[in-house]
Amino acid sequence: MNDLLNIALPKGRLGDKVYNLLESIGYDCREIREDGRKLVFENPATGVRYLLVKPSDVAIYVEHGAADVGIVGKDILEESSPDLYELLDLGIGRCRMAVAARSDYREDTSRTLRVATKFENIAKRYYASLNRDIEIIRLNGSIELAPLLGLSDVIVDIVESGTTIRENHLKVLVEFMPISARFIANKSSFKFKNEIITQMTEKLNGVIKV
Amino acid sequence: MLQAYDPLTRAERAGLALRGMYERYGYRKYRMGQFEEYSLYMDNKNFLSSENVIVFTDLDGRLMALKPDVTLSIVRHAAKQPAAAEKLYYTETIYRPSTESHTFKEISQMGIEYIGMIDRCAMSEILLLAARSLEAFGPAWLLEISDMRFAVGMLDALGLRDGLRARALTALGQKNRPALTAAAAEAGLSDADADALAALAGLYGPWEETMARAKALCRSEEMTDALGELQALRGAVCEEHAARIQLDFSLAGHTDYYNGMLLRGYLEGLPRAVLTGGRYDNILKKFGKRGGGIGFALDLSEIGRLPETRGGADIDLLVRYTKDADPAAVVGAVSQAADTGLRARALSQEEDAFGLHWERQLLVTGQGVQEGGLQGE
């Protein structure tokens, strides 16, 4: 699998924006849009192979060299701190990491704060920077439920438009980290496939609107 | 015709070749104790990549640790020696936490250390041996060189301190231009200074071209000295290695550990650096030893993942035999194959060969030995 440049792309919400971006620099993604089940797409004309993976796994594929480059949200990089090169801020998939709570919430600073989140490390770092003692409740989804049911005081999660937060009768208390998609590269691939990765970086840099 | 079986893996073969090479260059083998006193790591934890160490109480009550690092042990040994220069090599097992699995990982390491007066001859020798060590594992390798003083000198010249400096160093290691630009903005740097900081991320590539770009970015004597010292090593790089040795000033390792030249080596097909090293005078100073230290380590565990060229069979010759076969003929057939370097084993025909892969098969019956088909399971 070494002759082509292996690109790990996220499935799901960020996917469409990423395919548009790649098409704008001449990397054909039509096949990906058409086929809903395949996970590997080859495009010998442009010398690339796309690997469709779960957004949170993109960085793992790249760090372990199964993919040479990838496109991944900054939230994933901040959470897992993988050892790789972060070459570009692509400016797409913009959202914020935020703290939210029930709309009638008032913080009791005399108690340990219970924080429900998928982003354990990000939450720990944020509250450590505030010197706030917290208890993490690690959840994998439907985080918004936690404060409503009294499972936690607040949540730390990604906010894009804020609709989910509002619809669940929550309010954003603070937004502390801007997030957008990043173009990442495996450190070893960056050396051995430097020409093609550098070309791709330059093309992407030419079209991104940061 | 089946070829004689070589039990050594690529990494093991190269490891043996490297031992020979290090000995020929005057390095002595240094075998250290399996455990170190925990106090060595407590007193020097700023030199370790992680404070997490596997600790246990020995039967005599001393608190011991499984080594997370070899250089500290070697420096402690060398610090007590009256000799001016120590040239040592080692093959050791170390235990470090894996950031991926969040468990401790056993890593087999091989490396060399040069401790004493480190001049440009010593540095050239280390550079040459690093290149030749990588070369031993195959033709597709790359060695990157940097000098800590260049990146650190830039941060000093731009007045980046404390948290901002740490963030800039992390961003540099990721070649993360947007993060460097953000750090520059936070520090209130001028546009020219911000551009210079961001340019560090892209300061890598072939020696001459990268050196020229680096010279244009020099802002202090420290940075100029770093480039001067690196340039003095250029002559030690032979022509056949020149295309595989590059400069990369975004390499800015552990600032407590390293203080000068830095080395990182890669092998094609392996996702991480397999060779790491550099100049570590600070550790010598901490142990009260004059002079400096320089060396590198190869991660043999990572190198062990290189694909092997040998086929997928478990054995070369399977000798199947019937109940009435002469035991001497069965053992004889196995011995004959083993003596020519093949892997052979006998298996009664009454037994299932399920899960076994072989290249060639013989059948021994009461009537004698006959060829019994090729390759199978």
Image (cartoon, rainbow, N blue to C red):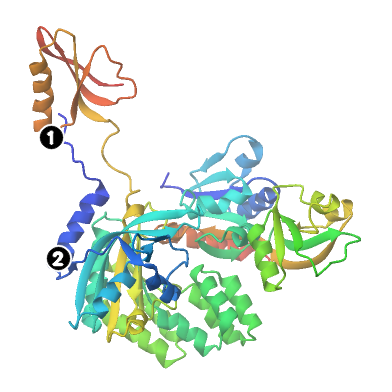
Helix, strand or loop for disc 1: loop
- Asked if residue B374 lies left or right of residue A179, the reply is left
Q: Give whichever of B181, B5 is nearer the camera.
A: B5
> On the image, which quarter does residue A80 sit in?
bottom right
Q: Earlier in the sequence, mark 1 or mark 2?
A: 2
In the rendered image, which quarter contains the N terminus of chain A? Answer: top left
- Asked if residue B114 lies left or right of residue A128, the reply is left
According to the picture, the residue beneath numbered tag 1 turns out to be B341
3D distance between C-alphas at marks 1 and 2: 29 Å
In the image, residue B337 sits, relative to residue B26, either above or below, namely above
> On the image, which quarter does residue A131 sit in?
bottom right
- The amino acid marked with disc number 1 is Gly
The dot on residue B23 is 2
Q: Position of residue B254 (x, y in %)?
A: 44, 74
In the image, residue A1 sits, relative to residue B70, either above or below, namely above
Q: Position of residue A74 (x, y in %)?
A: 64, 61
Q: Position of residue B288 (x, y in %)?
A: 31, 85
Name the chain letter of the residue that bears numbered label 2.
Answer: B
Q: Give whichever of B295, A4 is nearer the camera.
A: B295
Is disc 1 surrounded by few (<14), some (14 to 19) or many (20+) residues within 10 Å? some
Q: Position of residue B59 (x, y in %)?
A: 34, 59
Residue drawn 65% across and 81% down? B186
Residue placed furthest toward the front: B60
Residue drawn 54% across and 40% down? A40
Q: Give whichever of B287, A185 is nearer the camera.
A: B287
Q: Are marks 1 and 2 on the same chain?
A: yes
- Asked if residue B259 lies left or right of residue B24, the reply is right
In the rendered image, which quarter contains the C terminus of chain A? Answer: bottom right
In the image, residue B313 sits, relative to residue B253, either above or below, namely above
- The amino acid marked with disc number 2 is Glu
